[in-house]
C-alpha cells in the first residue's frame, strides 16, 4: 500500500479514529526508515502507530470531526528484557552439602492478582529447561533466568517510555504487599550472595516472590508486565502462579495467559479469562520426593500402595514375620526378608491445580505423558449450564491418548464435568490416588479478546470455559 496522501486514489475521505489507526498501522514498509528507531521490525510495527498518528493529525485538519491525535492513549508493549540471569538455583541435596551450603528451592511464587502497587496483570510463562540443570560444579551450576515485558498506554513513545520505567521487577522473599520495596528489603532479595564463592556468585533462596511493582504512589490500571521464568528441567518443587486480566480500557481487552512448558513438579494456577496451557515433561515423575529408580519400582509393582509395607523372603514367598513391617525400621533389618513393595509415600504425589477466578471463564488444557498414574477432576462450575446452553462449555479427557482411562459414569450426562482415573495399574490401590489433576473454570461465557496491541480496537468474541486433558496436544 502506498503512503497516505490527500491525492492517493485509495485515501479515505474521513477516517474515524479507530479505523484510522488500523489504516495507518498497516503502513510500516511505506514509512522511511529514518522515522523509526533502530530496532527490529516488530518494534517498527509498534512505533509506526505513533508516526501514523502524526499523519492522522494532518488528516484530521482536512475535515475529520474527531478527537486529535494527542488526546488518544494507545497500547504499547516493549520487547522482552532479561532482568535476572545466571543466579544459582539449587534443586537437589547435592547443593546443600559442603562446600555449597545452600538451601533447596522448594517453592517459587510468580505474579500477584490484587493490590494497588504490585500487580503484574500480564501473561506468565514458565519454561523448564535442561540447559539450566547444571550440576554440582562451581563452573556449571543450575540457574534461573527472569525476563519481563512491560506494557502501558500512552500518547506517544516518549510518554510510554517514561511511564514504563516506573514498572519494575519485584523479586524478594517477603510476600508482596502494596509497599514499594526500600532499603529494608535488601536482605530479602532473591539474589543472595553465595558465601562459598570467591567470584561474587548469587544464589536463589526458597520461597521467592516474583511480580512487578510501580515505583510511584499508585500503579496505573493499564500498566503491568508479562513475566517469563526459566528454571532447571530437573526442579520438582511447587510452582504458584497468579495473574489477572488487564481490561480497564474496554476497547483493548488484554487477557492474561499462563503457559507452563515441561513441568517437572507441582503447580497451582489462578487466572481470569485467558488461556492456561500446562504441559508436563516427558520424564515427569508421579511422586515429587521419590527418585526415578524408586518410582520405577512402584510402576513395576503396579503402584500397589495398599500393600506397600510388605516384605517377602529371598525365595519370593511371603514371610509372616515381616508382613506389614516398615521398610526402613524392620524389613531392612530382617536378613530373611527382601523389600517388594512401592517405596514412595502416597501423600507425596504431585498436584496440578488450575482454576479461573470467581465469576470468570477461562480455557484450561493439561497435557501429560500417556503412562502417568493420575486422577483428574475437570469441571465448569457455572450453575446455569445445561445441554442447550450457548456457549456450551465442555470438560473432556482424551481417553484414547492414555494407556488406560476409566471415566466416572456419574458425569456422562453433564459434558461440563468429568472425573477420570488414568493408568491405574493396581487393583488394590487406593481409589483416587496418583497425580492429582484439578482444573476448574468458574463460569462459561463469551469473552472479548484482543491478542496483540495492534488489535486493541478490533478484538474478537470467543467462548471461554472449556477444559481439556490430553497427551501430546500441546
Image (spheres, rainbow, N blue to C red):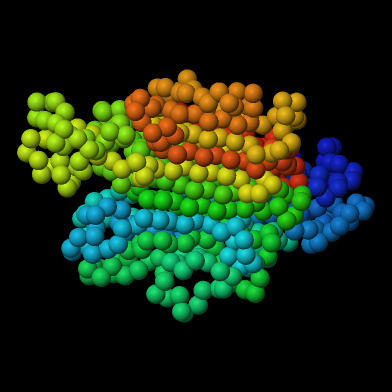
Where residue 215 sits, quadrant-wise, is bottom right
Task: Report the number of discs.
Answer: 0
Asked if residue 290 lies left or right of residue 144, the reply is left
Task: Name which residue lies at 39% across and 75% down.
Answer: 187
The x and y percentages for residue 248 are: 73, 56
- For this orientation, the residue located farthest to the left is 335
Q: Provide residue 17's location: percent of width, then percent of height.
A: 83, 50
Front residue of 402/349: it is: 349
Residue 182, image x, y percentages: 50, 77
Residue under the image location 56 percent in, 30 percent down? 418
Q: Is residue 353 above or below residue 144?
A: above
Q: Quadrant of residue 19?
A: top right
* Residue that protrudes farthest toward the bottom in the picture: 183
Q: Is residue 114 above or below residue 339?
A: below
Question: Can residue 423 be seen?
Answer: yes
Q: Is residue 180 above or below residue 349?
A: below
In screen coordinates, is 398 left or right of 5?
A: left
Q: Residue at x 46, y 65 (%)?
A: 171
Q: Which residue is nearer to you in this view: 45 or 18?
A: 18
Left or right of 83? Residue 222 is: right
User: Can residue 139 be seen in the rendering of this structure?
Assistant: no
Q: Position of residue 240 (x, y in %)?
A: 48, 52
Camera-side residue of 457 and 157: 457
Frontmost residue, 119 versus 290: 290
Q: Which quarter of the rendered picture does the N terminus lie within? A: top right
Residue at x 48% of width, y 60% of height: 210
Q: Residue furthest front?
A: 320
Q: Is residue 6 above or below residue 315?
A: below
Residue 338 horizontal side relative to residue 56, left or right = left
Amino acid at each position: 500500500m502506498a503512503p497516505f496522501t490527500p491525492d492517493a486514489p485509495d485515501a479515505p475521505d474521513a477516517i474515524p479514529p479507530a479505523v484510522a489507526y488500523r489504516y495507518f498501522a498497516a503502513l510500516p514498509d511505506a514509512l522511511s526508515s529514518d522515522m523509526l528507531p533502530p530496532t527490529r521490525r516488530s518494534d517498527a510495527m509498534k512505533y509506526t502507530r505513533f508516526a501514523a498518528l502524526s499523519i492522522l493529525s494532518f488528516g484530521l485538519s482536512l475535515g475529520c470531526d474527531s478527537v486529535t491525535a494527542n488526546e488518544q492513549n494507545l497500547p504499547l508493549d516493549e520487547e522482552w528484557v532479561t532482568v535476572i540471569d545466571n543466579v544459582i538455583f539449587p534443586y537437589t541435596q547435592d547443593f546443600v552439602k559442603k562446600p555449597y551450603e545452600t538451601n533447596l528451592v522448594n517453592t517459587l511464587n510468580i505474579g500477584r492478582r490484587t493490590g494497588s502497587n504490585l500487580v503484574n496483570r500480564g501473561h506468565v510463562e514458565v519454561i523448564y529447561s535442561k540447559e539450566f540443570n547444571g550440576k554440582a560444579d562451581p563452573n556449571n551450576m543450575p540457574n534461573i533466568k527472569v525476563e519481563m515485558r512491560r506494557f502501558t498506554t500512552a500518547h506517544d513513545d516518549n510518554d510510554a517510555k517514561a511511564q514504563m520505567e516506573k514498572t519494575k521487577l519485584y523479586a524478594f522473599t517477603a510476600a508482596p504487599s502494596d509497599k514499594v520495596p526500600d532499603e529494608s528489603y535488601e536482605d530479602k532479595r532473591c539474589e543472595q550472595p553465595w558465601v562459598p564463592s570467591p567470584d561474587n556468585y548469587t544464589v536463589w533462596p526458597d520461597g521467592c516472590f516474583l511480580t512487578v511493582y510501580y515505583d510511584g504512589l499508585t500503579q496505573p490500571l493499564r500498566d503491568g508486565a508479562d513475566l517469563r521464568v526459566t528454571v532447571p528441567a530437573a526442579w520438582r518443587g511447587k510452582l504458584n502462579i497468579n495473574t489477572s486480566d488487564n481490561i480497564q480500557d474496554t476497547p483493548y481487552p488484554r487477557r492474561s495467559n499462563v503457559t507452563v512448558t515441561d513441568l517437572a513438579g507441582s503447580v497451582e494456577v489462578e487466572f481470569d479469562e485467558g488461556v492456561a496451557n500446562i504441559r508436563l515433561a516427558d520424564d515427569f515423575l508421579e511422586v515429587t520426593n521419590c527418585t526415578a529408580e524408586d518410582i520405577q519400582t512402584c510402576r513395576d509393582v503396579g503402584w500397589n500402595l495398599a500393600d506397600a509395607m510388605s516384605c517377602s523372603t529371598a525365595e519370593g514367598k511371603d514371610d509372616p514375620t515381616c508382613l506389614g513391617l516398615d521398610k526402613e525400621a524392620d524389613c531392612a533389618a530382617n536378613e530373611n526378608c527382601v523389600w517388594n513393595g512401592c517405596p514412595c509415600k502416597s501423600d507425596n504425589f504431585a498436584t496440578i491445580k488450575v482454576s479461573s477466578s470467581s465469576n470468570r471463564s477461562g480455557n484450561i488444557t493439561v497435557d501429560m505423558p500417556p503412562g502417568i498414574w493420575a486422577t483428574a477432576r475437570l469441571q465448569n462450575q457455572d450453575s446455569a449450564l445445561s445441554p442447550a446452553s450457548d456457549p456450551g462449555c465442555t470438560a473432556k479427557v482424551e481417553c484414547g491418548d492414555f494407556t488406560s482411562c476409566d471415566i466416572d459414569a456419574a458425569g456422562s450426562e453433564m459434558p461440563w464435568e468429568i472425573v477420570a482415573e488414568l493408568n491405574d495399574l493396581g487393583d488394590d490401590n487406593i481409589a483416587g490416588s496418583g497425580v492429582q489433576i484439578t482444573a476448574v473454570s468458574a463460569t462459561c461465557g463469551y469473552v472479548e479478546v484482543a491478542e496483540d496491541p495492534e488489535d486493541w480496537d478490533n478484538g474478537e468474541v470467543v467462548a471461554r470455559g472449556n477444559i481439556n486433558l490430553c497427551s501430546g496436544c500441546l
